[in-house]
Image (cartoon, rainbow, N blue to C red):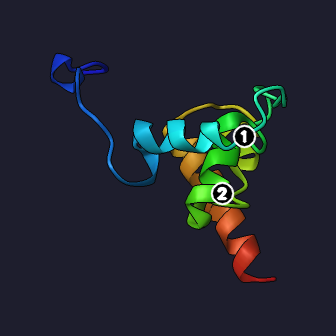
Amino acid sequence: MLYDPKWRGRTLEGPMALQNFIAWLETKDPEEKYDWEDPRICVLAQFLGETAPCYAGAPWRDIAYATEPFTFGAALKRARIVAARRENK
């Protein structure tokens, strides 16, 4: 099932908690713009990069937006290729 009604009202904990996101936004210049189309510097990428270092520098574009097909299986293959490249550096 793509959507489960039980998910409504569910809250995230840890670095993805909405309260943490709001607190982080309060530290930013309210006039500063971000590029919502670029997954490396969109508002969520910046938030995760600053508050959850394990997400910083992750090559999301190479995995999620690289080439078709846009399936989870293809994304998994691309992620493994990216991980292997990083290990060989």
* Foreground disc of the pair 2, 1: 1
Residue 57 location (% of width, % of height)? 73, 61
Work out whether 81 lies above or below 25: below
Q: Please name the amino acid that badge 2 sits on.
A: Glu
Q: Secondary structure at mark 1?
A: loop
Residue 86 location (% of width, % of height)? 74, 74
Circles 2, 1 touching at the beta carbon (< 8 Å): no
Q: What residue lies at 68% left-to-right and 63% top-to-bottom? A: 81
- Which quadrant of the rendered structure holds the N terminus? top left
**Mark 2 sits on what residue?**
50
Residue that lies at the very extreme toward the bottom in this rendered image: 88
Residue that lies at the very extreme toward the left in this rendered image: 6
Q: Residues within 10 Å of mark 2 (few under 14, many from 20)?
A: few
Q: Is residue 76 left or right of residue 27?
A: left
In the foreground, 22 or 42: 22
Residue 53 location (% of width, % of height)? 61, 66
**Mark 1 sits on what residue?**
28
Work out whether 35 lies above or below 58: above
Work out whether 64 lies above or below 48: above
Which picture quadrant has residue 33?
top right
Work out whether 74 lies above or below 77: above
Q: What residue lies at 70% left-to-right and 46% top-to-bottom? A: 46
Q: Please name the amino acid that badge 1 sits on.
A: Lys
- Which quadrant of the rendered structure holds the C terminus? bottom right
Residue 72 location (% of width, % of height)? 50, 39
Q: Secondary structure at mark 2?
A: helix
Q: Earlier in the sequence, mark 2 or mark 1?
A: 1
How many numbered markers are drawn? 2
Q: Which mark is residue 2?
A: none
In the foreground, 2 or 35: 35
Q: Residues within 10 Å of mark 1 (few under 14, many from 20)?
A: few
